[in-house]
Amino acid sequence: MPTLEPIELTIDGDLLVESHHGTRNENSVLESWVGNHKGCGNAMHRHHSNDKFDCIVCTGCYLRISFPVSVRTYGELRKCLTVLFNNLRANRGNPWRA
Ligand SMILES: [Zn+2]
């Protein structure tokens, strides 16, 4: 299994990358220490938000990404965010991103 490719976190170009390169792949479980926010460079942690959602939060810039609590792995996070971004891009609701 190849190592983890960066995961797109926002449609503004934010990426999640491995903090310990080569130790994680798509099937690795997304635990409390998730990885690093590329560019910003700080650690991102998983937190429980409510019955439906968990989130990962950057300890440096406080970027917060919400996702279904059922997401277990990096691959599942990538899939659910890809669906979200496809919807956002199709709607083109924000002129900054036109
Ligand atoms: Zn950050």
Image: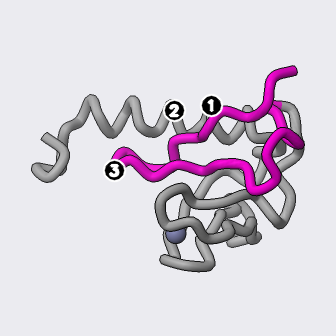
User: Which quadrant of the view contains residue 52?
Assistant: bottom right
Q: In the image shown, does 6 or 73 lie closer to the viewer? A: 6
* C-beta proximity under 8 Å, tags 1 and 2: yes
Which residue corresponds to mark 1? 79
Q: Residue at x 49, y 67 (%)?
A: 40
Q: Position of residue 56 (x, y in %)?
A: 65, 64
CA gap between label 1 and label 2 equals: 5 Å
Q: Looking at the magenta stretch, what is its main secondary structure? A: loop
Residue 75 vertical placement versus 1 (above, below):
below
Location of mark 3 (residue): 12
Indicate whether 98 appears above or below 51: above
Q: Which mark is residue 82?
A: 2
Magenta stretch encompasses residue 5: yes
The residue stretch that appears in magenta: 1-26
In this rendering, the label closer to the viewer, 2 or 3: 3
Q: As shown in the figure, which amino acid type bears the numbered disc 1? A: Lys
At x 62% / y 31%, what residue is drawn?
A: 79
Please rate how many residues cluster around mark 1, counting C-alpha atoms within 10 Å: few if below 14, some from 14 to 19, many from 20.
few
